[in-house]
C-alpha cells in the first residue's frame, strides 16, 4: 500500500509534469501509444491527459485481448456450445459478438456457457461433471497464457479441452508502428506482459524503427515517468528501450513462465 501511495504522490507528479512541459516545449507534436487496458484506465481515471502539454498525445492501442479476438474464433466457441459442449470463459468475452451472435446469445438459446474467474475453475468443473465435455476459451496476452499452459501441463481430465485464442503484444506493436498514417513517436509497453516476456522482445522497436520504448507500471507516476522518458529520448535523438517498471520487470522476464509457453 505504501508503494502504491508513493507512486500517487501529487507533489512529485506536479514536478514530473513540469519537466514534461519543459521538454515538450522544444518538440513538435508527439504521439505516444500505449498497448494496455490498465494503462488506459489509469490515464483516464486520474485525468493524466489533462496534465500533458497540448502537443503531447497519448493514444490507446489494442490493449484489451477480448477486443481483438477475431469473430471467427468467437464463432468457434459458439459452435461448440451449441453442439452441447460446456464452454467456460471469462465474463468479459460473454457479450463479444461473433459473425452472427455472441456466447451470451448462445446461452439464451439453451447452450451451457459458464463464466469462470480462471482456467482452474473450469478444470474443477470438468472433474466434478465427468459425464460432460468441457472447453475453456483461453483468451489474453502473455500475462494470462502461462495459467492456461500450467493446466495443460498438469494433464487435465479427459473431458477438458482448450480453445486457445491467446495473442502476443510485440507483433501487435509492430503492426502499429508500420501503419504510417498513425505517425507514432514512442511506445509505452505494458508492465504485466513484460513481467513474463522481459525486455528483449521490445528491442526491435528502437533498433529497427527508431521508436523510443519504455516499459511502465500502472500507477499515475509510472505513466508520467514513461512519458517523460520518451520525451527525453526524443530530445536526445537517441531512441532506446528503457524499463521504468524496475520494481516488477526483470530484463529476462519470468523464465519459468516462458518455458511453459514453448
Image (cartoon, rainbow, N blue to C red):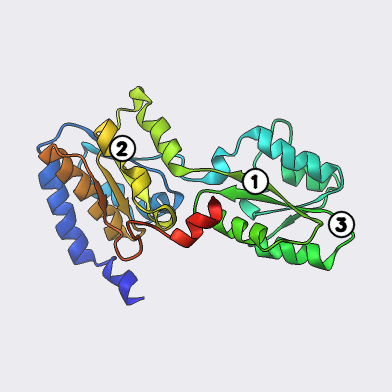
From the top left corner, tell me how far across and down residue 203 is, in percent.
31, 42
Q: CA distance from mark 3 to mark 1?
A: 20 Å
How many marks are shown on the rendered structure? 3
Q: Residue at x 64, y 46 (%)?
A: 164
The disc, 1 or 2, on the residue closer to the chain's N-terminal end is 1
Q: In which quarter of the view is residue 158 placed?
A: bottom right
Q: In which quarter of the view is residue 80 placed?
A: top right
Q: Nearer the viewer, residue 87 or 51?
A: 87
From the top left corner, tell me how far across and down residue 177 is, in percent.
35, 31
Residue labelled with disc 3: 132
Q: CA distance from mark 3 to mark 2?
A: 47 Å
Q: Secondary structure at mark 1?
A: strand
In the rendered image, the vertical position of residue 200 relative to residue 221, given as above or below: above
Q: Nearer the viewer, residue 221 or 186?
A: 186
Q: Residue at x 17, y 56 (%)?
A: 16
Q: Residue at x 37, y 54 (%)?
A: 198
Residue labelled with disc 2: 205
Which residue, as the protein is rendered here, is positioned at the far right? 131
Q: Secondary structure at mark 2?
A: helix
Q: Which mark is residue 140?
A: none
From the top left corner, tell me how far across and down residue 236 is, in percent.
11, 40
Residue labelled with disc 1: 164
Amino acid at each position: 500500500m505504501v508503494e502504491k501511495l508513493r507512486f500517487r504522490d501529487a507533489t512529485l507528479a506536479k514536478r514530473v509534469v513540469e519537466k514534461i512541459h519543459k521538454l515538450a516545449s522544444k518538440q513538435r507534436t508527439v504521439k505516444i501509444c500505449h498497448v494496455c487496458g490498465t494503462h488506459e484506465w489509469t490515464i483516464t481515471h486520474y485525468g493524466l491527459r489533462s496534465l500533458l502539454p497540448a502537443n503531447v498525445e497519448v493514444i490507446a492501442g489494442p490493449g484489451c485481448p477480448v477486443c481483438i479476438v477475431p469473430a471467427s474464433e468467437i464463432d468457434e466457441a459458439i459452435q461448440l456450445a451449441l453442439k452441447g459442449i460446456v464452454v467456460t470463459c471469462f465474463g468479459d468475452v460473454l457479450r463479444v459478438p461473433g459473425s452472427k451472435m455472441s456466447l451470451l446469445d448462445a446461452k439464451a438459446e439453451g447452450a451451457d456457457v459458464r463464466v469462470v474467474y480462471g482456467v482452474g475453475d473450469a478444470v474443477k468443473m470438468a472433474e466434478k461433471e465427468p459425464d460432460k465435455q468441457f472447453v475453456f476459451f483461453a483468451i489474453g496476452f502473455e500475462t494470462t497464457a502461462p495459467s492456461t499452459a500450467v493446466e495443460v501441463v498438469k494433464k487435465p481430465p479427459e473431458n477438458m479441452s482448450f480453445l486457445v485464442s491467446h495473442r502476443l503484444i510485440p507483433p501487435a506493436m509492430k503492426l502499429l508502428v508500420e501503419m504510417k498514417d498513425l505517425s507514432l513517436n514512442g511506445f509505452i509497453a505494458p508492465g504485466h506482459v513484460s513481467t513474463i516476456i522481459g525486455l528483449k522482445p521490445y528491442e526491435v522497436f528502437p533498433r529497427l524503427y527508431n521508436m523510443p520504448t519504455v516499459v511502465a507500471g500502472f500507477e499515475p507516476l509510472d505513466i508520467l515517468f514513461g512519458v517523460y522518458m520518451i520525451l527525453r529520448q526524443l530530445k536526445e535523438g537517441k531512441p532506446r528501450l528503457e524499463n521504468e517498471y524496475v520494481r516488477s520487470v526483470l530484463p529476462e522476464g519470468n523464465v519459468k513462465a516462458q518455458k511453459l509457453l514453448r
